Amino acid sequence: MGACLSVVYITKNAGQHFDRSLASVAHIADELLVVDSGSQDNTLMVARSAGARIIERSWPGFAAQRQFAVAAAENPWVLMMDADEILTETAAKIIRNTFLIGEPAGVAGYLLERRSFFHGKEICYGDWSHDRVLRLFDRRCGAYGENLVHEAWETHGTVKPIPGCALHHYSYANYGELLNKMRLYATLNAQQVHQRGKVLRGYMPMTHALAAFWRGYFWRLGFLDGVEGAAIAWTTALGAFMKYAMALELRDHNQQ
């Protein structure tokens, strides 16, 4: 008998890709769990239509909400999904076959390849180029870290990649959404830098911004993605600038 798998989401106004995301995992999920923090759109209706179990809970932060959702899952193995991610058919077959004969032995988690799309095209270079994310894991062997943003599952067991297992990521519909998310992440990152008591210098906003642009646009060949690649590189650089500028602002405010 195969091992059981919970597919878990945290949501708030999940957006246009949520129904496709749920459909992409429905046939491999023994449980669909959605932890929602006050959606005002059709998120809950879409989740109910897919047969998901819904828990409504106020927002405590990314890592805390994900940890709560993992703890609330019914099964020991969890596939953590975002509402703007689509599991490919090939990936779904690989995961289904992995769990078909029983619980994986000697493995605490699997890395999935994530491919990002913007303006209908795949982003192949720069900071959004193909990366591997630990999303399929045994919840008994780890926990989410305490980062305010870009939280990740941390496990003390063995982690392996699953070749050919991919998520398609549709995170932003337009440049306005890209800027709005940059502002949110910059604010959270600044708070994190401040809380950790990192030594800050006045030149840091500029040096980190220049380094981020160089890395994404030139070193990682972001210019090969055209206008979208340039927008991603500039926005990432602006986010790095604002992260340290706001951290300096927080430090100076507290010293007054």
Image (spheres, rainbow, N blue to C red):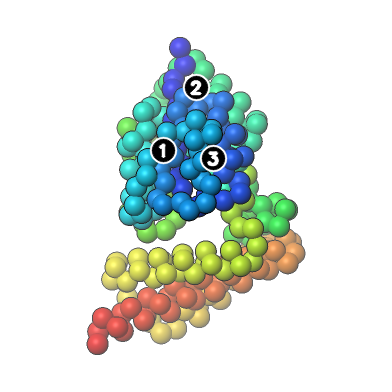
| Numbered tag placed on residue 99 in the rendering | 2
Residue at (53, 47) in percent of width and height: 42
Residue at (26, 81) in percent of width and height: 254
For disc 1, the neighbor class at 10 Å (few under 14, some 14 to 19, many from 20) is some
- Marks 1/2 in contact by CB < 8 Å: the verdict is no
Q: Image check: 36 left or right of 46?
A: left
Q: Amino acid at mark 2?
A: Phe
Q: Amino acid at mark 3?
A: Val
Q: Amino acid at mark 1?
A: Ile
Determine which residue is flagged by label 3: 46
Determine which residue is flagged by label 1: 54
- Marks 2/3 in contact by CB < 8 Å: the verdict is no
Task: Give the image location of residue 181, x and y in percent.
Answer: 52, 64
Task: Give the image location of residue 38, x and y in percent.
Answer: 41, 52
For disc 2, the neighbor class at 10 Å (few under 14, some 14 to 19, many from 20) is some
| Label 3 to label 1: alpha-carbon separation | 11 Å
Task: Give the image location of residue 226, x and y in percent.
Answer: 75, 64
Q: In this orientation, which residue lies closer to the viewer: 246 or 207?
A: 246
Number of marks in the rendered image: 3
